[in-house]
Amino acid sequence: MNPPSTEMSPAFWSSGNGLGEIAPGQVDHNSDNHGPQLEMETVYSAISRGTEALVYNGQVPESEYQRMRAPFQQGEFPGPVRYGYMNVGRVVAGPPSLVGRYGFCLFPHQRRYRVPASAVTILPEEIPPGRAVLAANLETAINGLWDGEPLVGDRIAVVGCGVVGCLVAWLASRIPGTRVTAIDPNANRRAVLAALGIGWAPESARDDHDLVFHTSGHTSGLETALSLAGNEGRIIEMSWYGEQAVPARLGGSFHSRRLTLRSSQVGQLSPRQLPRWSFRDRMALAIRLMADPALDNLITGESDFEQLPDVMAELARGASDTLCHRIRYS
């Protein structure tokens, strides 16, 4: 076995106390892996606003330290930690047939890295690298729909129109006969949703929905989601709150309407899919679905890698209205 490489490359590190910096990160991961390796030069990464803000601010509960580890995380919670999972790079070393191709990897914000080839999903030629940073978010949305099990003609509400919420609504709207309403008080979401072919509403008084997805990350959004479900309705909770306590009113008509409230988390495959699908299959599906140019509307901000400490500080404070914020490395 070869000794571990000490090669380093600039990476973004969160300290876990509302601070972050660019500092060296390990290039090699799993250096004892005997399968083919790919050396990747990052061209784009993107910030997962909800989860990365919790990591940045040190709000990952100690009970979740292991479950919330990113696949190629370096360091331990609460920090300093190299964390992230939305990375598109160019293959610069590896099997000759792949050199020069672009691929998506669940890798943090870092200029260069080396991983097993099995950790990289090579992009089809028709998928632009800049759009492919959405793959992890789309994978989360796919898993949410698998957990929600929407049916033809379902009346579906999506509460919270961040990137994941928009993608959930977009996927649900492609099921024949569905009535999909995306609910968010932010009127700036209207144009983005219209570009995806989805109706927007600041609120809704209807309580006839067969299926409601909650993706806002705010406790008030969960209250809204509960109020929108009709008799025997299903509410899929896709928000993650870290250490924050979440009140939920389960009195009133919750029991008489026989509502079902269940969680969805991308770290596990839906039990219905698990016998036939792998994590790699699910990611490949997300990549294929990104052929639609309309998804470019979800990328509403972009910065250079060197600006990432300031950008992350702004996003973690909730001071920006951007959806997907992309980081460029050229």
Image: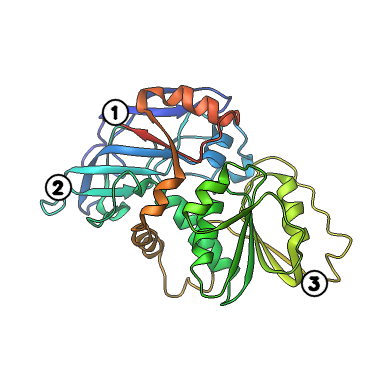
- Per the image, label 3 sits on a secondary structure element best described as loop
The quadrant where residue 45 appears: top left
Circle 3 packing at 10 Å, graded few (<14), some (14-19), many (20+), is some
Question: What distance separates the C-alpha of mark 1 from that of mark 2?
Answer: 20 Å
Circle 2 packing at 10 Å, graded few (<14), some (14-19), many (20+), is some
Mark 1 or mark 2, which has the lower sequence index? 1
| Residue type of the residue flagged with mark 3 | Arg
Residue 133: where, in percent of width, then height? 38, 46
Instruction: Tell me if label 1 and label 2 are in contact, CB under 8 Å.
Output: no
Question: In the image, what residue occupies the spot 72% across and 70% down?
Answer: 233
Residue 320: where, in percent of width, then height? 55, 31
Residue 206: where, in percent of width, then height? 75, 63
**In the rendered image of this protein, does residue 176 appear above or below residue 93?**
below
| Residue type of the residue flagged with mark 1 | Ser
**In the rendered image of this protein, does residue 32 appear above or below residue 126?**
above
> Does residue 156 show up?
yes
- State the residue position of label 1: 9
| Residue type of the residue flagged with mark 2 | Val
The quadrant where residue 302 appears: top left
Mark 2 or mark 3, which has the lower sequence index? 2
Closest to the observer, 226 or 174: 174
Q: Residue 99 carries which label?
A: 2
Q: Quadrant for the C terminus, please.
A: top left
- State the residue position of label 3: 258
